[in-house]
Image (cartoon, helix red, strand yellow):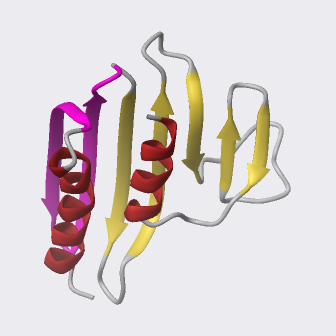
Amino acid sequence: MLLRNYLQLFRQGIEKLENFGYTESIQIKEEIRPNKQAIIKAKIILVDNSVLYIKEYIDAKYKIDKVSYAYQYQDSDGRLIFRYDNAVHRPALRFKEHKHIKAEVTIEASLPDISDIIDEVVGYL
């Protein structure tokens, strides 16, 4: 998949929230870098004032590789509902890709697709 195709699919996933009237505002910043790399940052404020933050660092030289990512959804008071990421933890986790549920629990979780993230957020609305 080409980087531009991935970015288009990403935007379509976010637009799903907007098309169904779930958003108050959407901010997306795409930084295209040399060697088929990109950084995507998004902040989506939803109708209940919850917020979805998205960060992806993509290397698309040979395939779409999400080098690092974080999808954080929090309630209107800033409390974590969930976060998927692949950040290194101290002390180390037994797995790289994981999901934080609330602030207390971290479980192993595969890299989610943007449409899966959107569907999960909609489930909380």
Residue pushed farthest top? 77
Instruction: Indicate the quadrant containing the N terminus: top left, top right, bottom left or bottom right.
Output: bottom left
Residue at horizontal 78 percent and vertical 27 percent from the top: 104
* Residue 15 screen position, x and y as percent: 18, 54
Residue at horizontal 78 percent and vertical 59 percent from the top: 95
Q: Is residue 83 left or right of residue 61?
A: right
Q: Is residue 48 left or right of residue 123?
A: left
Q: Is residue 26 magenta?
A: yes
* Residue 54 screen position, x and y as percent: 36, 44
* Residue 66 screen position, x and y as percent: 43, 67
Instruction: Indicate the quadrant containing the C terminus: top left, top right, bottom left or bottom right.
Output: top left
Residue 122 found in image quarter:
top left
The answer to whether residue 28 is above or below residue 43 is below
Residue at horizontal 48 percent and vertical 15 percent from the top: 78
The answer to whether residue 103 is above or below residue 107 is above
* Residue 115 screen position, x and y as percent: 38, 63
Compare residues 2 and 99 and report the one nearer the observer.
99
Residue at horizontal 69 percent and vertical 37 percent from the top: 101
Point out the stretch of residues depicted in magenta: 22-48
Compare residues 40 and 43 and report the one nearer the observer.
43
